[in-house]
Image (cartoon, rainbow, N blue to C red):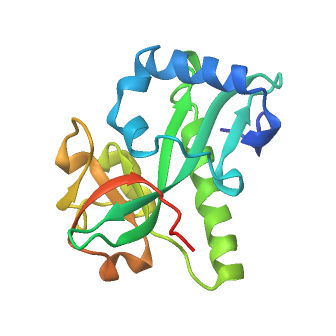
Amino acid sequence: MSPKTASLIPLAACDPAMVEAVLDRAFGPDRHARTAYRIRAGMAPLDALSFAALDEDDLLVGTIQCWPIGLLTQEGRQVPLVMVGPVAVVPERQGEGFGIGLMSAMIEADARLAEERGASLPQVLIGDAAYYGRWGFTNAATKGWRCPGPYEQDRLLARGAALSAMPAEGMLGPWVTPAA
């Protein structure tokens, strides 16, 4: 993605119907049956970490969304995480660097937020380790984590300094706000 020909904007600035159209084109209309949708069911995307890519003609060609989720331990404790994805680029523009630009923008935004808060939440996604590994995503900490639906264990990836303190086992799901 060339900075001279494309731009990134907050996803919240986009028409939701256009975002849905990009997601349908990138993943197909049956995408809602994927396990990632079950993990983040009922959650709203995190605006500070969700972006859209516009091409040189200001057409929406890609998006990234991040979601608040939790890892529910066997003891019933929920540990907060951020689910990354979908990272979507329309088929005819894939391979041009839009996905890399979107991921890089999200990582930079997360670093800024972590500096403000003093900490960063671990991030998790279901994806290709060869692609997402460039941002530090690995399956080293996720071998005992489970998802509510079909998935390939080696594609369950996570990154973040706090991973060493994460539970070794648990079930991923929507973030449930603790009762006051």
Front residue of this view, candidates 28 and 133: 28
Q: Is 119 located above or below residue 71 in the figure?
A: below
> Residue 155's spot in the image, x, y percent?
26, 46
> Residue 113's spot in the image, x, y percent?
68, 72
Q: Is residue 8 visible?
A: no
> Residue 52's spot in the image, x, y percent?
70, 38
> Residue 131's spot in the image, x, y percent?
38, 46
Q: Is 110 located above or below residue 39 in the figure?
A: below
Judged from this view, the residue extending furthest toward the front is 180
Give left or right: position of 143 versus 26. left
**Quadrant in the picture for residue 168:** bottom left
Q: Is 158 located above or below residue 4 in the figure?
A: below
Q: Residue at x 55, y 24 (%)?
A: 23
Count of numbered marks:
0
**Quadrant in the picture for residue 80:** bottom left
Q: Residue at x 63, y 86 (%)?
A: 118
Give left or right: position of 7 versus 159. right
Front residue of this view, candidates 81 and 62: 81
Q: Residue at x 56, y 16 (%)?
A: 92
In which quadrant will I find the C terminus? bottom right
Q: Residue at x 48, y 59 (%)?
A: 176
Q: Is residue 96 visible?
A: yes
In which quadrant will I find the N terminus? top right
Judged from this view, the residue extending furthest toward the bottom is 118
